[in-house]
Image (cartoon, rainbow, N blue to C red):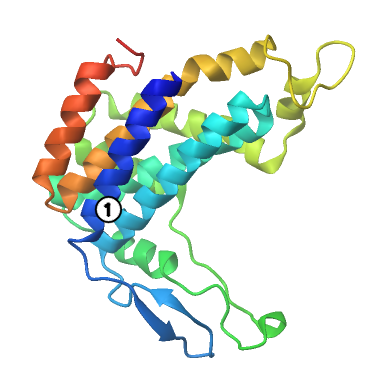
Amino acid sequence: MDHLFAVAVRAMKDAQDEMQQVVPQPRFVTSEVGHRGHRFVEQLPQQALLLKAVRILSAIHTLKLTIDAGLLLDAGASMRILDEIGSEVQFLAAPYLTNAGREAIHDEFLTEFFQEEFDHSDVLKSSQKRHRVSRKKIRAYVVRAYRQEDASTHTDVLRLIDNTFSGFVHGAAAHIMDTYDGKRFSVPAPGDHASLLDFRDQFSIYLHRALMDFAFAAKALGCEAIFARLYQFITTTFADEGSVR
């Protein structure tokens, strides 16, 4: 798995570098309240897809490191992040990959995504609020756009996954109890810990999905060569459900 992970990461990094070249580049700007930094000033869906791909690459690294370190709670949080970012890539890419049109919620999503964190030069006086598009709306659009069979069941499954893994992010008691072995809490968990072994078994699925999300983003950006390269790697390396061939 270490070798496969290294090859997959190299493929995603190469794709990321190439995708960066097809969107307007970041500029070093000063915000209305005086904060300075690099930003995508055009705030295009394609730029959002690139940034989401960057976040996926970071999260899959974190997932590998936390599993290897026995930090199963943090591994669960990384899985939840990958689930969420992956659905957002599919959401943003759908108007370019399917017959589903761009909807008002895409504009709402992009406005919130590119929104600055602070609206005052003194961050303690900032009153910035975010208007996030709900996970429910994103799930519904993704299912509708890609026309999955039995859409209602598919939506319920996505909602169940989101809700289950959210507990790792928010520190739900049930998930923290996964570190308890009947005698004590084990942080980090030993290599033979049952929950940690489950996460290790799922890692190839998350690596497969990270690569697929990169392929979605590349195709939506019109990078057909990158898409073809990633798709060939995915289909020759993984089975449909994400296990390694």
The picture places residue 73, in percent across and down from the top left corner, at 67, 31
- Which quadrant, please, contains the N terminus? top left
> Nearest the camera: 90 or 53?
53
Q: Is residue 21 left or right of residue 121?
A: left
Q: Residue at x 40, y 22 (%)?
A: 3
Q: Which residue is mark 1?
A: 17
The picture places residue 150, in percent across and down from the top left corner, at 27, 23
The picture places residue 178, in percent across and down from the top left corner, at 73, 21
- Count of marks overlaid on the render: 1
Q: Is residue 172 visible?
A: yes
Q: Quadrant of residue 27?
A: bottom left
- Which quadrant, please, contains the C terminus? top left
Q: Is residue 156 left or right of residue 230?
A: right
Q: Amino acid at mark 1?
A: Asp
Q: Residue at x 10, y 42 (%)?
A: 225
- Say what secondary structure mark 1 lies in: helix
> Nearest the camera: 154 or 202?
202
Q: Quadrant of residue 140?
A: top left
Above or below for 206 versus 34? above
The picture places residue 14, in percent across and down from the top left corner, at 27, 45
Above or below for 222 versus 90? below
Q: Is residue 129 left or right of residue 72?
A: left
Q: Residues within 10 Å of mark 1 (few under 14, many from 20)?
A: few
Q: Is residue 149 visible?
A: no
Above or below for 104 versus 177? below
